[in-house]
Image (cartoon, helix red, strand yellow):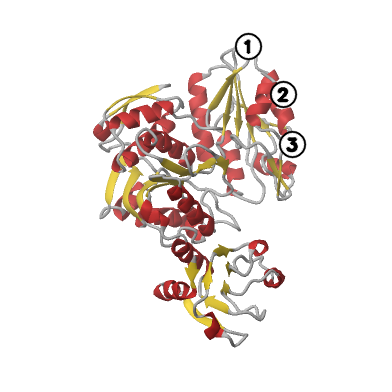
Amino acid sequence: MIRIEQVLAVLKKDKNFREILDQGNYYFEWENLAFSKISYDSRDADAETLFFVKGAAFKKEFLEQAIENGLRFYVAEQDYQVGIPAILVTDIKKAMSLLAMEFYDHPHDKLKILAFTGTKGKTTAAYFAYHILKQSHKPAMFSTMNTTLDGQTFFKSQLTTPESLDLFRMMAQAVENGMSHLIMEVSSQAFLVDRVYGLTFDVGVFLNISPDHIGPIEHPTFEDYFYHKRLLMENSRAVVVNSGMDHFQVVKEQVSLILHDFYGPDSENQITQSQAFNFDLSGQLAGHYSIQLIGKFNQENAIAAGLACLRLGASKEDIQKGIAETSVPGRMEVLTQTNGAKVFVDYAHNGDSLQKLLDVVLEHQTGTITLLIGAPGNKGESRRKDFGLLLNHYPAVQVILTADDPNFEDPAAICQEIASHMTRPYEVIINREAAIRKAMAGTKEDRDAVIIAGKGADAYQIVAGKKDASYIGDLEIAKKYL
């Protein structure tokens, strides 16, 4: 419940209030008005709703339909002249975030919140943190892969970081469920469009940075992408940063006056011994660790999660046990064919993560390696060039270009765009299942491997703006052809 007086007080405090337009000349009748719902979906609006008009695609008729359903008040950046009072603001997304906090009684103050950002590894690090914290605490988790508000039931997330009204609603539900901690992935987009405006995190973790999400509907430049990633550091009480990341000195200077821990090269916390399924650490978490996820980059994700959880009350024993228990759907999942060849299913979906995936597989598999890779339509267009140029450095790897969430683009055209940057042999098989079947049929011995990259645990293809569930997912398809 939120009263109109609270709404105005929050907006005025943030200097985001312009005026109330009272087209019905009955403003004073609304002075004691209270709302039991908040929403940005006009189909969900009624007489009890404070409605937020957001998005470039919003149409006046959406608002008119909501009024037919009883809507009496709305918040917007412009006057739609629909005959009901409007609260005009300068920035609707900032207004949404702060008013959602107020509506749900500031649930973020009742949780210890751990946030991860980085170009890659956010989901894996979040899962490590979840398994660490659940040893002695009650964590909720909002991740790209799955969300849980009670530690028992999990559901698929729609956005890396939910829209602010959904974010604080889910936080409130987690509090009601008795959760003590919340683990979040925070994307650069979350800061770009103010989904987390006004929120301060107890610990923020910066895993890495490389060019990604650069395009017409995302970040215009790498500098803009990096800037919005760094905003997590400014909005955290304590931070954990990878000293081996690109542009580390920029972040190091930024966090110099914040409580901070570094891990990686030339830091106190670094790996002293690394094998496929175990590693040793020096520093605050010194000791021996077992791990299910192969690759040194996954060990670094585990360290980041461990240091962050240490600040949030986890013991070293919790950290060791949590790391050992962690597996992540669609991240380095490994199947074995009847001939002994390995099949790796991984979410690697940009140049940097693909390079790390290739390197770790080539370290363990010394036979014929076949890679299936595509790129999504209508997003992350810079990845296509990155993939093509990267694959030129792996001439021994057989490459099959295939469909990966083409959306409104032609998947064949996307494959050709990747190929235009390649100076090495490749094959194009647009049908992803056919590509997987052919790659797996080509293995002969236990030294061989097939790498299916890009989609991870997604059991669908995005085509023409919709999820096509007839595609059952890389892992399930690979199991069919073992």
In the rendered view, tell whether residue 58 sits above or below residue 425.
below
Q: CA distance from mark 3 to mark 1?
A: 29 Å
How far is mark 1 from mark 2, CA to CA? Answer: 15 Å
Q: Residues within 10 Å of mark 2 (few under 14, many from 20)?
A: some
**Which residue is at a point 63% across and 41% down the rendered structure image?**
421
**108 is higher (above) or lower (below) than 390:** below
Amino acid type of the residue that numbered disc 2 sits on in the rendered structure: Lys
Comparing marks 3 and 1, which lies closer to the viewer?
3
* Residue at disc 3, secondary structure: loop
Is disc 1 surrounded by few (<14), some (14 to 19) or many (20+) residues within 10 Å?
few
In this rendering, the answer to whether 420 lies above or below 286 is: below
Q: Which residue is mark 1?
A: 339
The residue that mark 3 highlights is 470
Q: Residue at x 51, y 82 (%)?
A: 19
Q: Quadrant of residue 450?
A: top right
Q: Amino acid at mark 1?
A: Asn
Mark 1 in CB contact with mark 2 (< 8 angstroms): no
Tell which circle, 3 or 1, labels the residue nearer the N-terminal end.
1
Q: Residue furthest bottom?
A: 25
Residue at (45, 76) in percent of width and height? 5
Report the residue marked by disc 2: 438
Asked if 452 appears above or below 367 in the picture, the reply is below
Residue 478 in picture, x, y percent from top left: 66, 25
Q: Is residue 132 visible?
A: yes
Closer to the camera in the image, 181 or 352: 181
Q: Which mark is on residue 138?
A: none
Residue 302 horizontal side relative to residue 445, left or right: left
Quadrant (top left, top right, bottom left, bottom right) of the C terminus: top right
Snapshot quadrant of residue 384 = top right
Q: Position of residue 119 (x, y in %)?
A: 48, 45
